[in-house]
Amino acid sequence: MAHFDINGVQLWVEEEGPEGTDGPPLVFVHEFGGDHRVWREQVDHFKGRYRCITYNARGYPPSDVPDDASAYGQQIALDDLLGVLDTLAIDKAHLVGLSMGAYNILRFALDHPDRVLSLTAASGGSGSYPPTREQFLKESRMVAEMYLASETLAGSGMFDGPTRIQLKAKRPDIWQEGADYFAGFSPRGAGYTLRQVQCERPSLYDFEAELAALKVPTLLMIGDEDELVIDTNVFLKRTMPHAGLLVLPKSGHLVNVEDPVVFNRAVDDFHAAIAAGQWPERPAGSRSANVYSPEDSE
């Protein structure tokens, strides 16, 4: 657990795992509404076999919270992830991201496929779906300005929204813990992250050609009640020939926290399939809408 000088700021990085660096690197990238602590139950599960790295993005104490809006941005977030890998001398890693973190690892893999062993992208794609993109941007900009004008995030209502009520019903104590630490985040860090990163990042639909060419094994994971991302992940599954899509029933946005046992087992199975050579590229013929044969027939 330490601060590292990365990309012009100090980022808080935590590492657990086998003694030395023998375990394969597993790097977790957090969501907007949480920090490195959102991965606690994943790190506890994987740390006996993997070199588990979590970190707080800029704007999330104890990482630095820059005062200047220009110190935040989507490309900066990708550069920070690259900086974490470089600083820890990680050549290639399994990447696991949640929501904002899922978007980041997908984009990172497009830029640096040689640094990625696999992608587990959970609940990614908020704001990408074309029919609801303008609504997402309008609401996000409004909330960002509200945060920037506030002295605290307590009472912001973030954890009472439609993406987190499933967690509240399943695990109210964990929901309360998350709500409490979100309330202690920096309003400036949250506001600039929302305005400069989430509102300025392109839609994943803008990268259709690049995603179609990506050869990194990918597990997409969503909850079936997470309206923000369902359509986008169906698009990703159809677009990315090396992606599989897992939909968790009666689940919302925070799938790794709502159902950690199911989430962890899915990642274990995914990694085992890769190791066994059993995570194949999607057969081209499966894309046909024809029901009975590969050829169109009258």
Image (spheres, rainbow, N blue to C red):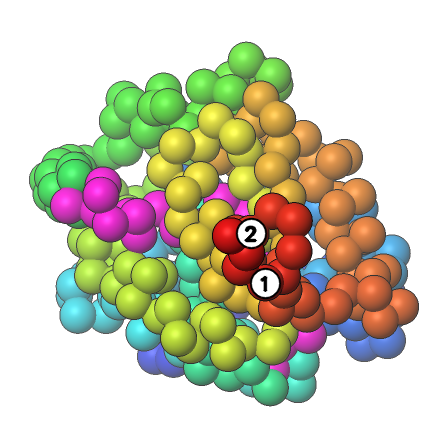
Q: Which residue corresponds to the image point at 54% horizontal and 33% vertical from the top-left?
A: 223
At 45% from the left edge and 32% from the top edge, which residue is drawn? 226
Q: On the image, which quarter does residue 295 sit in?
A: bottom right
**Left or right: where 36 falls relative to 21:** left
Q: In the image, which is nearer the foreground, mark 1 or mark 2?
A: 1
Which is nearer the eye, 28 or 230? 230
Query: Residue 145 appears at what percent x and percent y?
Result: 11, 43
Which residues are drawn in magenta?
Answer: 115-134
The one of 87 and 76 positioned closer to us in this rendering: 76
Q: Amino acid at mark 2?
A: Asn
Q: Marks 1/2: CA distance?
A: 7 Å
Please tell me whether residue 177 is drawn above or below residue 9 in the rendered image: above
- The residue under label 1 is 295
Q: Nearer the viewer, residue 292 or 48?
A: 292
Give residue 27's position: percent from left, percent from top: 63, 64
Q: Quadrant of residue 156?
A: top left
Identify the residue position indicated by label 2 in the image: 290
Q: Secondary structure at mark 1?
A: loop
Residue 289 is left or right of residue 16, and the answer is left
Q: Is 68 on the left-hand or right-hand side of 105?
A: left
Q: Earlier in the sequence, mark 1 or mark 2?
A: 2
Question: Does the segment drawn in magenta span residue 266?
Answer: no
